[in-house]
Amino acid sequence: MTIDDIKNICVIGAGNMGHQISVQCAMKGYNTVCTDISAEQLKKAEAFADAYLPGRVAKGKLTEDEAKAARARLRFTNDLADAAKDADYVIEAAVEVLALKRKIFADLDKMAPPHAILATNSSAIVSSKIADVTTRPDKVLNLHFFNPALVMKLVEVVQGPHVSDETCRISMELCTKLDKIAVHVKKEVKGFLLNRIFLRIYEEAQWMLEMDVASVEDIDKACVYGAGHPMGPFTLMDLTGIDLAYTMCKETFMDTGDPADLPRPHLVEHYVKGEYGQKTGKGWYDYTKK
Ligand SMILES: NC(=O)c1ccc[n+]([C@@H]2O[C@H](COP(=O)([O-])OP(=O)(O)OC[C@H]3O[C@@H](n4cnc5c(N)ncnc54)[C@H](O)[C@@H]3O)[C@@H](O)[C@H]2O)c1
């Protein structure tokens, strides 16, 4: 298979990541089907596409014809079988729960054509924990986009031991076609490449908060005004989702059994209150007041 054989992309999950990955794929010329079990999420994703594409025209980034063509290439459905049946490449961006991803990939393996590459956008679950539920482990890998997926250029292509060089090469080439910068992560390590570096910052930021060394605001300020980061770790967590940070810690703990990997008390507090960050209006910061 070559990159030119990839025409149809299926994106699973229309949440934070999936809805933007879908629009990016459609804008870059791929017939894209976005699927989710939640009708509400699909409706929101469709409304986003309907507003975003004309917005790009207004900003002079797309012509009207390009926006119309992109919209025509993009379809939303709650039927996984329908979404996967013609896919050459699948990008799964459903919630960060291993058991759920394994079920999705087992289903996908039956529903998607045998040549299709099945990628997960997981932030922390390596594809070798999923690939064995399929009959094509050499075609199952991590393709890790960053949030917001329409804006952030980086994509990590993670080559676990079961992933073929061909799958990896096509995935790297696909990223280029999607106008992204791909990096090849040659081994499955916790956090992959960039989050492995950021994990240290998250851990230290939360430790300082738990120890009452500094406030959320001041820790964020230090990273922005001292280290030149575009935003501090708590603002970033509000953007990416406190629910995601929480489930990532839980999944890591299940894996390692190390209490140091458990979510920290302040993080748990926000999680149990349903304060997931920007998407719920409140997280480390209160967005209802802004
Ligand atoms: N949020 C981030 O910053 C970020 C960045 C990179 C990668 N990721 C990864 O992307 C994935 C999605 O994260 P998100 O932040 O978009 O989550 P999200 O909670 O915003 O969206 C997840 C979506 O998956 C849907 N879903 C749940 N079960 C499903 C199923 N069986 N079939 C289809 N859809 C299903 C939910 O209805 C929801 O719309 C996760 O694996 C996460 O680790 C997230």
Image (cartoon, rainbow, N blue to C red):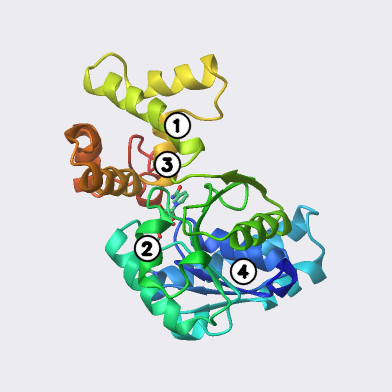
Distance of label 3 from label 4 (alpha carbons)? 38 Å
Classify the position of the N terminus by image quarter: bottom right
Which residue is denoted by mark 3 in the rendering? Answer: 189
On the picture, is 221 further left or further right than 71?
left
Q: Say which residue appears at 82% left-offset and 63% top-offset.
A: 63
Q: Decide which of tag 3 and tag 2 comes sooner along the chain.
A: 2
- Choose mark 1 or mark 4, whichever is in front: 1
- Which numbered disc flags the more N-terminal residue, 2 or 4? 4
User: Residue 239 placed where, x, y %?
Assistant: 44, 43
**What amino acid is labelled 2 in the image?**
Ile
Q: Is mark 3 within 8 Å of ligand 1?
A: no
Q: Quadrant of ligand 1?
A: bottom left
Looking at numbered disc 4 in the image, what kind of residue is underneath it? Answer: Asp
Residue picked out by circle 4: 50
Q: Position of residue 184 (x, y in %)?
A: 60, 46
**Mark 1 neighbour class, 10 Å CA radius: few under 14, some 14 to 19, many 20 or more:** few
Foreground residue, 50 or 134?
A: 134
Q: Secondary structure at mark 3?
A: loop
Left or right for 159, reference 65? left
| Upstream in sequence: badge 3 or badge 4 | 4
Nearest to N terminus: mark 1 or mark 3: 3
> Percent x, y for residue 277?
36, 44
Where, quadrant-wise, is the C terminus in this rendering? top left
Q: CA distance from mark 1 to mark 3?
A: 14 Å
- Residue corresponding to mark 2: 130
